[in-house]
Amino acid sequence: MPDKTISNKMEAFYRTHAYLVEHTNAPVRRALMDEIDWNDRLIGIKGTRGVGKTTFLLQYAKEKFGTDRSCLFINMNNFYFSDHSIVDFAYEFHRRGGKVLLIDQVFKHPGWSQELRTCHDRFPKLKIVFTGSSVMRLKEENAELRDIVKSYNLRGFSFREYLNLMTGNNFPAYSLEEILSDHEHIAKTILSKTHPTTYLQDYLHHGFYPFFLEKRNFSENLLKTMNMMIEVDILLIKQIELKYLHKIKRLLYKLAVDGPQAPNVSQLAADIETSRATVMNYIKYLADARLINMIFPAGEDFPKKPSKIMLHNSNLMYSIYPVKVEDQDLLDTFFVNTLWKDHKVNKGDKNSTFIVDDVMPFKICPEGTKIKNNPGVTYILHKAELGRGNLIPLWLLGFLY
């Protein structure tokens, strides 16, 4: 392609970048911003559709570079990349003094992983940060990137992030160990400034996905996002034919209607007219897309059958099947979702709802639960503002990230 054409196109990308950075106003500074080692040369940021990956990239550009041309944001949705390679673009950007290339939705570009490898090897002074779907298996399925990419997950808002946004506070996150050992002191510190229980139900309904801030109907927006997760993130990335789309959607709906329980794989296979093996594969894809979570007995994992399937977060419960949102299911879903980031959650025994990290039993207690206190179990209380001993308010677990 003639140099003049490249030059004109590059100018258009710079202008778009400047406009996007100037108009980016992230409502909450995500904790992941400080967890990433930005010195690495190839960084992948995965996450569920709708959690704010694009905003995260632009916020990074704004914080570190402003409109400095050494950093450039590009999106693989741009039709330019249907006829041009990432490598050629990176070469031109690098030649112009570019140092950090931010690539959004990289998986939409054919051969993206090999091209990123080529960029990494050919341009040692260029850093590339890219976003991708949670369905992507960066290291397991892309051998060319395994030894060079650092992968991170951007999650939806935690209850802490949501509360900070709603109240104007800047509460820090706490580890599970800190909460277990010092929850009364931590809770009192927070309660001196706000009453978290006032905001918890709204968070459970619509606080996980940042787009609740947009002036659109949240449930309709979430349903649209969920359809995109299946149609693009699962079908495109997993190379599934479009004719099977309705089977995956029907499976998700049936899992939502059934509520958190062990799946009857044979019945589900009959319902969606496919094999048991295909049902299990679809369940795994739905879990990879962060639409569901699978809970296994201790010591077991996929491809074994999970002991319970639950929706990935409580917002999904209200959007898919709002006529049947039970308190126990809602609280269990919140607990698993907030623990999932840094901990392993398995099915509990007769005295507990879940076992965390193989050794910590937790029992999730809706309001009005009669507790026969077992000192070896941690009880999570729904509407309590303050706990004591091994009784901890549910809202405080929303401060894990």
Image (cartoon, rainbow, N blue to C red):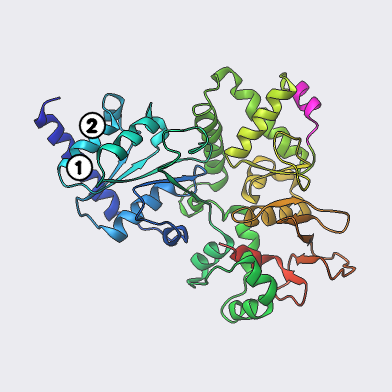
Residue 274 vertical placement versus 395 (above, below): above
Q: How many marks?
A: 2
- Residue 5 in the image: x percent, y percent? 13, 30
What residue sits 57% from the left and 56% below the top?
207
Location of the N terminus by quadrant is: top left
Determine whether, in the image, residue 119 is placed left or right of residue 268: left
Magenta range: 263-271
Marking on residue 292: none
In terms of depth relative to the viewer, which is nearer, 217 or 194? 194
- Residue 15 seen by the camera: yes
Q: Which secondary structure, mark 1?
A: helix
Relative to 63, is 272 above or below?
A: above
Q: Position of residue 246 (x, y in %)?
A: 62, 24
Q: On the image, numbered disc 1 is attached to which residue?
A: 94
Q: Amino acid at mark 1?
A: His
Number of other residues with Cα within 10 Å of mark 2, as a class: few under 14, some 14 to 19, many 20 or more: few
Q: Is residue 24 visible?
A: no
Q: Nearer the viewer, residue 27 or 389?
A: 389
C-alpha separation, residue under disc 2 versus residue under disc 1: 10 Å
Q: In the image, which disc is placed on residue 88?
A: 2
